[in-house]
């Protein structure tokens, strides 16, 4: 598989897996309004996942479409970040995971709109409108909960600390990333890291929360297909129908 | 602090030139979140170009018991309707 196909597949897998995670809140959100807001984000992400994965399928040229990529791959063939497959936990965990992801997603898409690959630039341009809202919403909620009650403050701080070790993978760079940067297709990951750290620091400070050390030890492996145990369970639920009744449609 | 968020009424302008129309209500802790929630709950199908939210408690409404006093007097003043006056044939497109 070409580096570009892998790169695009990673983008699609992030959106797909995070969307599936958010869907688990459907009907169980802490308030009707939150429930709908979160599932709206999930819907935006699934739309983006379709665009990325159908492009990835074309680049791979193996005769698959976006549905087959989503529903018939095993866990080790998924290239999403470890962050997005982490379980929902409590609402603070879900929001912090979203906050870390949205900020990175926003800065990344902003750069991808300048990509030398026209199709990638197009998808980024379409997605960034949605993600601009996501990032506004999750940052806003972090400030509210961090600066809220003693309990909400404590829960958000705990989530910030626990999920921190999954944030580094967003800025890790392997051979695929490097060849994409060289081809002008994707931005440099350390550029994104500087922007991300600065913005996280600003929002956490406003929320009265402590940012963990930037040089802390970080988990990695998701992009290369080495996942936590959580992904298997998520896929079992997401893929059950297509695996049991291949090709079933509405 | 009350556990329940206050109630807000939501008004959406469906397109430029039209008035904002009441579409429903929602709960939110403050005005900013009320706008965000209104966007998420009431504009999912491309319904609007503008949103107003008003705290339900800030709306002053007429009392249903006053219906007679407020609205009935208008009933017997048919000349307030333009259709009461016969128009000459020559005046078209009125």
Image (tube, coloured by chain):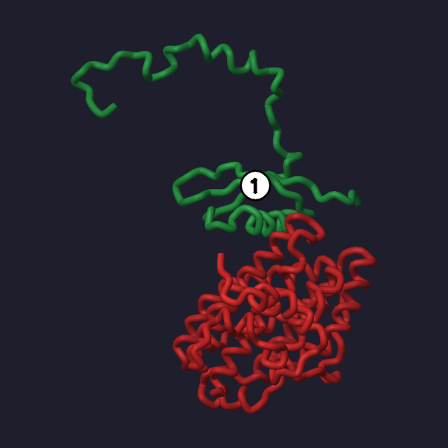
Q: Residue at x 48, y 76 (%)?
A: A112
A199 or A113, which is in the foreground?
A113
> Horizontally, is A9 left or right of A159 in the view?
left
| Residue A131 seen anywhere in this rendered image of the structure | no
Q: Secondary structure at mark 1?
A: strand
- Residue A135 coordinates in the image, percent (x, y): 59, 64
- Residue A179 coordinates in the image, percent (x, y): 50, 90
> Horizontally, is B92 left or right of B4 in the view?
left
Q: Colour of chain B?
A: green
| Residue A162 seen anywhere in this rendered image of the structure | yes
A39 or A115, which is in the foreground?
A39
- Residue B66 coordinates in the image, percent (x, y): 60, 15
Q: Quadrant of residue A142?
A: bottom right
Q: Residue furthest front?
A: A245
Q: Tell me: residue A211, above or below residue B11.
A: below
Q: What letter labels the chain drawn in red? A: A
Q: Tell me: residue A143, above or below residue A104.
A: above
Q: Residue at x 53, y 40 (%)?
A: B11
Q: Residue at x 70, y 71 (%)?
A: A86
Q: Residue at x 75, y 61 (%)?
A: A90
> Horizontally, is A182 left or right of A93 in the view?
left
A188 or A224, which is in the foreground?
A224
- The residue that mark 1 highlights is B10
The chain to which mark 1 is attached is: B
Q: Residue furthest top?
A: B76
């Amino acid at each position: 598989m070409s580096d570009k196909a892998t790169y695009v597949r990673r983008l699609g897998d992030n959106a797909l897996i995070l969307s599936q995670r958010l869907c688990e809140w459907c009907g169980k959100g802490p308030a009707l309004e939150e429930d709908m807001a979160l599932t709206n984000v999930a819907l935006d992400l699934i739309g983006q996942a379709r665009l990325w994965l159908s492009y990835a399928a074309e680049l791979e040229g193996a005769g698959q479409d976006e549905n087959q990529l989503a529903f018939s791959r095993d866990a080790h063939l998924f290239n999403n970040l470890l962050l997005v497959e982490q379980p929902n936990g409590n609402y603070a965990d879900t929001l912090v995971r979203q906050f870390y992801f949205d900020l990175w997603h926003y800065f990344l898409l902003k750069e991808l709109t300048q990509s030398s690959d026209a199709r990638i630039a197009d998808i980024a341009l379409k997605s960034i409108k949605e993600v601009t809202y996501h990032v506004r919403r999750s940052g806003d909620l972090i400030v509210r909960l961090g600066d809220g009650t003693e309990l909400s403050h404590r829960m958000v701080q705990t989530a910030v600390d626990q999920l921190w070790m999954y944030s580094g993978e967003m800025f890790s760079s392997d051979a695929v990333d490097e060849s994409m940067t060289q081809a002008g297709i994707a931005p440099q990951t350390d550029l994104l890291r500087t922007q991300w750290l600065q913005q996280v620091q600003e929002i956490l400070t406003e929320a009265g929360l402590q940012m963990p050390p930037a040089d802390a030890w970080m988990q990695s492996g998701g992009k290369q297909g080495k996942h936590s145990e959580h992904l298997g369970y998520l896929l079992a639920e997401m893929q059950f129908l297509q695996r049991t009744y291949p090709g079933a449609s509405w | 602090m009350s556990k329940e968020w206050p109630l807000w009424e939501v008004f959406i302008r469906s397109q430029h030139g039209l008035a904002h129309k009441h579409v429903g209500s929602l709960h939110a802790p403050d005005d900013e979140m009320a706008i965000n929630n209104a966007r998420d709950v009431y504009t999912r199908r491309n319904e609007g170009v503008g949103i107003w939210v008003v705290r339900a408690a800030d709306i002053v409404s007429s009392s249903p018991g006053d219906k007679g006093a407020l609205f009935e007097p208008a009933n017997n003043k048919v000349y307030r309707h333009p259709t009461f006056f016969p128009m000459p044939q020559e005046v078209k497109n009125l």
